[in-house]
Image (cartoon, grey):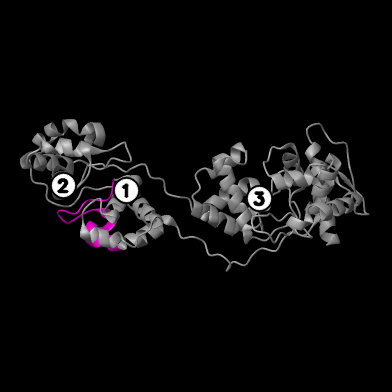
Amino acid sequence: MKRSVQILMLALTLAMGISYSSGGAAQPSATKPGEEDLRAANASSQDIAEGKRLADATCARCHGGKGVSSGKGIPHLAGQRPAYLYLELRAYQTGARGNNPMQAAVKFLSDDALVKVAAYYSSLDPATPVSTKAAPAKPDPVQAGKAAASGCAGCHGEGGISKTGGVPNLVGEDQKFLVAAMQAYKSGQRKHDMMKTLLAAVGETEMNNIALYYALQKPAKAQTPSPGDQAAGKAAAADCGGCHGDLGVSGNPATPSLAGQDAEYFVDALKAYKGGKRSDDTMKSLAAALDDKTMKNLAAYYANLQPQPPKAKKPLTTAEWVQRCDRCHGVNGNSTDPRLPALAAQRADYMDKVLHAYQKGERKNTSMAAMSSGLSDAEIENLATYYAQQKARAVVFMSK
């Protein structure tokens, strides 16, 4: 323990330009204006000892006797970066972080006491990483969607490109529309016994994965016949563009794109709206005025338009997210900046809670709010699990 403390102090003193004595106590140099938060990195062995006494009396009940927490959602503090710890303690004390238990714990501590507590915890050996077997990563949603959609290919074709008349193309449609359509079949709002049966055991997450998979496939026209007068269909489609977009490419996730759609399915859908089997007042009103020939012409026109890819973004893998996080938090979450927290070996449930707090705006940080905004629950869980499994290093390695 003593050696790891000395190594930590040496690394920090070298990084901060502080002199170091052979006795193990750092001799503080004059703190530059604006660098008051680095005082914890200048602490002497006596400061650390006083910090231990304060921490044992104030913090140990929740964060553990040596800064290794056993409480759900409560972070490990051992080996954490000193300036970061000081800044967080100050944030609680000033009310910038709304946490009543923490505010109460540090409310009456002097600024000098906060510095010493931060120095003490940063001097400790970090927590041991959790086993890699403890929590397997959530599957990639695209691959999960592909696997779940394997049973759909028999009717809807590989990649969602239909080769069977009367069966819709699934490519070129927005994720939200595809999920809404599946939910409508599952609930019986759309009448189709086979689809209702197939979707009965499919949950919301699986539906989202299936929809994402199809939304990311290269769009192509249905490989099915499209009899009818395309020119007449184009003229009849004048009233459709307002909702379904020019050339049948919708700009509204709630409204399907029609370009490249199977002609027979298209006609069947119009008849379902006209007859009331599908419930939509707008579509029922528009379909009511259409005869079978006009429906067939419309179907031929839209079936021969080129579908376009919807606005679907392929999720980053956990490895790709880690690369982004490591830019600030250090390789494998071992921060080299005393002001930025180390993530390695941190409790996964705590990191999960924190990332959601940044997403909701409960914790204020412009960079973290932007970084976390696009994370799904599964991605957050995977990131938290990854960092909890990394070996934490007490030494702050500074690059030249």
Please report whichever mark, 2 or 1, sits nearer to the chain's N-terminal start.
1
The residue depicted at 22 percent of the width and 61 percent of the height is 194
Assess whether mark 3 and mark 1 are in contact (beta carbons under 8 angstroms): no
Please give the residue where the numbered disc 2 appears in the rendered image.
272
Label located before the other in sequence (2 or 3)? 2
* Badge 3 element: loop
Q: Answer with left or right where residue 28 lies relative to residue 226.
A: right
Start and end of the magenta stretch? Answer: 151-172
- The picture quadrant where one finds residue 279 is top left
The quadrant in which the C terminus is found is top right
| Number of numbered tags placed on the structure image | 3
Specify the amino acid type for callout 1: Ala
Residue 239 percent coordinates (x, y):
18, 31
Quadrant housing the N terminus: bottom right
Q: Quadrant of residue 3?
A: bottom right
Q: Disc 1 designates what residue?
A: 180
> Mark 1 to mark 3: distance in Å?
42 Å
Q: Secondary structure at mark 1?
A: helix
- Residue type at mark 2: give it: Ala
Q: Look at mark 3 in the image and give the residue it sits on.
A: 330
Instruction: Count residues near mark 3 (Cα–Cα under 10 Å), then give few for <14, some for 14-19, many for 20+.
Output: many
Report the mark closest to the observer, 1 or 3.
Answer: 1
| 7 sits to left or right of 378 | right
